[in-house]
Image (tube, grey):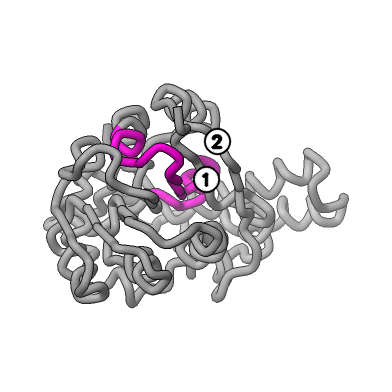
Amino acid sequence: MPSYVHPLAWLLALEGVALLRAQAGDLGDEEYVARRIAEIRRLTADRDLALSAGAVVGHVSTVEGYAQWADRYDSEENPLIAAEEPPVRRILTTLPPGRALDAACGTGRHAAFLAGLGHEVVGVDSSAQMLALARAKTPNGTFHQADLHDLPVESASFDLVVCSLALTHQPALGPALREFARVTRPGGHIVLSDIHVLSLYLGGVAMVGGSDGGLRAMPAGRFLAGDYIAAIHGAGLEIVACHEPRWGEVPGGHGGPLAQQWCPEAAAAAYHDTPALIIWHLRRPHR
């Protein structure tokens, strides 16, 4: 079902989250709440904002979306990637070199890092355009175009599987998790990262432009921690650790240029200490 986005609606939503956090006692006093209410009145009274054009948001597959995004993916500042890489790489640096699969490798940022750690690297992605960039970064790696639920590799052939910021695009977690379990050797490790469900509601749904000039959203599943746990256990895997890194300060501020122009304090309150990601360190049991 198509959704509808509007600049004023986005700003009011940020104000609402800021007020909810104030009501919960996370931040703010009477003066803070009064500022939020005054700012809401100012926003709703602004004629230009009220008359701004909204947009119907359609849908696009990840193959189509990343084909369009690939040429600028590495050059754009992505605060989610900036938040994701340090904790994921801290885990990866604790694991011994072996044979590593970068599942949904994208442009190959983790594949290149794994190769630098001494791993023999294989990458898989559904986007030919992203794979071309990954091959350029890791020329000694092996790369395949395929889906997460049907990996073109042998069973029990990897010491480590990494999947970064991709499971949210899946209609269900189970098929991919079962594939990861299948291709991991007994005693091997699996490291997963994904956008946190709370961040999806703070502008985290990936969108690209359509041929008609409109917006198109890529799939974004609203998976809760319990959904991951059920899929992990269903695949016969063990949980070593789970991390939920929170948003801190980001260059340029939260919420994008529109929020920074109209309600930077509310945007900061909406994001501050909200989980940005969910990261799982898993292991395939020896049994």
The reply to whether the C-beta atoms of the residues labelled 2 and 1 are less than 8 Å apart is yes
* Residue 92 at x, y percent in the picture: 49, 59
Q: Which residue is mark 1?
A: 281
Quadrant location of the C terminus in the rendered image: top left
- Which residue sits at x=32%, y=73%? 74
- Which residue sits at x=29%, y=58%? 105
Quadrant location of the N terminus in the rendered image: top left
Q: Residue 74, relative to residue 30: is it above or below?
A: below
Q: Residue 204, relative to residue 156: is it above or below?
A: below
The residue stretch that appears in magenta: 179-205
Q: Residue 216, relative to residue 116: is it above or below?
A: above
Q: Nearer the viewer, residue 17 or 234?
A: 234
How far is mark 2 from mark 1, CA to CA?
6 Å
Q: Is residue 154 left or right of residue 83?
A: left
Is residue 26 covered in magenta? Answer: no
* Residue 253 at x, y percent in the picture: 58, 70
Q: Earlier in the sequence, mark 2 or mark 1?
A: 2
User: On the image, which quarter does residue 221 sit in?
Assistant: top left
| Numbered disc 1: secondary structure | strand
- Which residue sits at x=72%, y=51%? 37
Disc 1 residue crowd, few under 14, some 14–19, many 20+, Cα 10 Å: some
Q: Using the image, tell me which numbered label, if any, was put on residue 239.
A: 2
Q: Residue furthest right?
A: 30
Q: Nearer the viewer, residue 181 or 125?
A: 181
- Give the residue type at disc 1: His
- Give the residue type at disc 2: Ile
Q: How many marks?
A: 2
Can residue 91 be seen in this snapshot? yes
Is residue 181 covered in magenta? Answer: yes
